[in-house]
Image: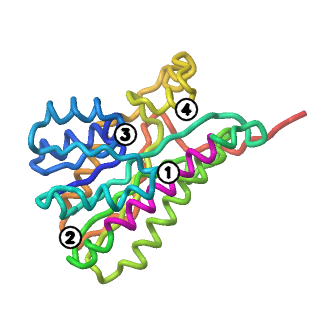
């Protein structure tokens, strides 16, 4: 099985790449940071093909995929993992540039990657698209604004793909994690403020990138007559947000 993972240079994507290769699959690890991909390829050997790709550069996606070596062309599983959150300020104080970056990565890049890979899957009558969502797509919270909206888009896009692909043999899944530690997510969100990022996980036992990787491998390893529509994962320490009431 050939698995293409975006955002594979760190976090969830890096853990997924390791897990899939260790389970005997071949991985196309796509990301922007060449040096991190090179280190991962050195570690994992011939089972991993590093691919320099920025999903926000949507015009490059078809040509980059077309240039894959012939023996790597048949992509069985696409994991749209590339994504990010930027900022936690209220909407009226947020950076429009940050909003645009999140939409470009979490939505526009994801749909362009899917559009590039899907026709070959449909032609073969087999394939799987796993899109990384978030509990933020289901449960709003202060400061979530556009990040949560981008992940709600992922949820609905994946379900609509499932509707379109009925009868084709191609499967689609949203995997929506909650509080997850040990990645760059919060450092990116807080723009390098290590203290603020650390406070997110203080006195908690969050889920890990390895938990996400193992779940992704489980989904991909299921019999082809099973479609997992949606999986939401939270650590035991986290639950659904309650109603917030502002009192003056």
Residue at 47 percent across and 42 percent down: it is: 178
Q: Nearer the viewer, mark 1 or mark 2?
A: 1
Quarter holding the C terminus? top right
Residue at 30 percent across and 35 percent down: it is: 34
Q: Residues within 10 Å of mark 3 (few under 14, many from 20)?
A: some
- Answer whether labels 3 and 4 touch (C-beta < 8 Å): no
- Which residue, given by chain and number where applicable, does mark 4 sit on? 189
User: Which of the two discs, 3 and 4, labels the residue nearer the N terminus?
Assistant: 3
User: Which of the two discs, 1 and 2, labels the residue nearer the N terminus?
Assistant: 1
Q: CA distance from mark 1 to mark 2?
A: 27 Å
Q: Residues within 10 Å of mark 1 (few under 14, many from 20)?
A: many
Q: CA distance from mark 2 to mark 4?
A: 37 Å
User: Which of the two discs, 2 and 4, labels the residue nearer the N terminus?
Assistant: 4
Q: Secondary structure at mark 2?
A: loop
In this picture the colour scheme is rainbow
Q: CA distance from mark 2 to mark 3?
A: 32 Å
Magenta stretch, residue numbers:
98-117
Does 8 sit above or below residue 161? Answer: above
Q: Nearer the viewer, mark 1 or mark 3?
A: 3
- Which residue, given by chain and number where applicable, does mark 2 sit on? 224
Q: Nearer the viewer, mark 2 or mark 3?
A: 3
User: Which of the two discs, 1 and 3, labels the residue nearer the N terminus?
Assistant: 3
Magenta residues, dominant SS class: helix
Q: Is residue 185 left or right of residue 129?
A: right
**Residue nearest the viewer, comparing 208 with 75:** 75
- Which residue, given by chain and number where applicable, does mark 3 sit on? 32
Q: Secondary structure at mark 3?
A: loop
**What x and y, as percent, mark residue 185?**
46, 33
- Which residue, given by chain and number where applicable, does mark 1 sit on? 106
User: Which of the two discs, 2 and 3, labels the residue nearer the N terminus?
Assistant: 3
Residue at 43 percent across and 29 percent down: it is: 184
């Amino acid at each position: 099985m050939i698995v293409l993972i975006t955002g594979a240079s760190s976090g969830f994507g890096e853990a997924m790449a390791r897990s899939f290769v260790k389970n005997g699959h071949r991985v196309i690890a796509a990301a922007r940071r060449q040096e991190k991909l090179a280190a991962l390829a050195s570690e994992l050997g011939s089972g991993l093909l590093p691919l320099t790709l920025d999903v926000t550069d949507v015009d490059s996606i078809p040509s980059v995929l077309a240039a894959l070596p012939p023996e790597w062309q048949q992509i069985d599983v696409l994991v749209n993992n590339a994504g990010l959150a930027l900022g936690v300020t209220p909407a009226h104080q947020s950076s429009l540039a940050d909003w645009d970056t999140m939409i470009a990565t979490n939505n526009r890049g994801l749909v362009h990657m899917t559009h590039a890979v899907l026709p070959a899957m449909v032609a073969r009558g087999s394939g799987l698209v796993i899109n990384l969502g978030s509990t933020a797509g289901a449960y709003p919270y202060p400061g979530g604004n556009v990040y949560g909206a981008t992940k709600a888009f992922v949820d609905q896009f994946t379900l609509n793909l499932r509707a379109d692909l009925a009868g084709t043999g191609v499967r689609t899944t949203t995997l929506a994690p909650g509080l997850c530690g040990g990645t760059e997510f919060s450092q990116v969100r807080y723009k390098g403020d290590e203290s603020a990022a650390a406070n997110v996980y203080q006195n908690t036992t969050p889920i890990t990138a390895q938990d996400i990787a193992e779940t992704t491998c489980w989904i991909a390893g299921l019999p082809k007559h099973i479609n997992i529509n949606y999986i939401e994962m939270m650590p035991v320490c986290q639950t659904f947000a309650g109603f917030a009431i502002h009192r003056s």
